[in-house]
Amino acid sequence: MLALDVMLTSFATIKPGAPLLDAVRLLLETGQRGLPVLDGSGALIGVISEGDFLHRRELGVHWPEGFWLEWLLSREEGRLVRERTRALSVDAVMSRKPVCVDECATVDEIVVEMDKHQISQVMVLRDTRVVGIVGRVQLITALERILTRSEGS
């Protein structure tokens, strides 16, 4: 089974300069786990997902001063991480290195990428364009179809 057999082909996207509130509302309205962030030409430049909204000062979640990540990444990068928790635009919060697979990737390859990066979805590309999303829901839906067919046999 390939990505093109299981991928979600109708999905919302967002522009990098969009307000963070727009991304939050789109996630809630669509039920998507994340939104591909596309530039003016339609190229994928990032992904903003549920995890990008967890450490928000509005929720009362703060990175403590001297946060351990600063020791791993350096104080400058730690400062940038904290700034992301305060940012109000998509481009300041999004992940800039989205995990992608080709539309001909096997489900096995997709699951390997999801496990390796500890993520719940991957973007599916045809050449350089996003043509789909495969997440846990799509994989579970595919499993349900297979189990239903085998039950009927």
Image: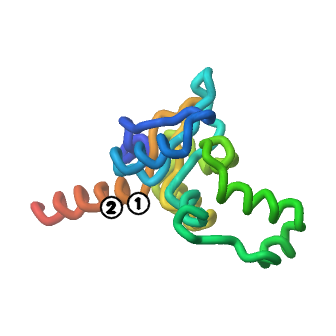
Residue drawn at 86 percent across, 75 percent down: 71
Q: Quadrant of residue 72?
A: bottom right
Residue drawn at 14 percent across, 65 percent down: 151
Q: Are marks 1 and 2 in contact (CB under 8 Å)?
A: yes
Residue drawn at 45 percent across, 39 percent down: 132
Q: Is 103 drawn above or below residue 87 in the view shown?
A: above
Query: Would you say 75 lies left or right of 46 here?
Result: right
Q: Position of residue 46 (x, y in %)?
A: 63, 42
Query: Would you say 27 lies left or right of 39 here?
Result: left
Disc sitting over residue 140 in the figure: 2
Q: Position of residue 80 (x, y in %)?
A: 79, 57
Helix, strand, or loop for circle 2?
helix
Which residue matches tag 1? 136
Residue 86 appears in the picture as rendered = yes
Helix, strand, or loop for circle 1?
helix
In the picture as drawn, the residue positioned furthest to the top comes out as 41
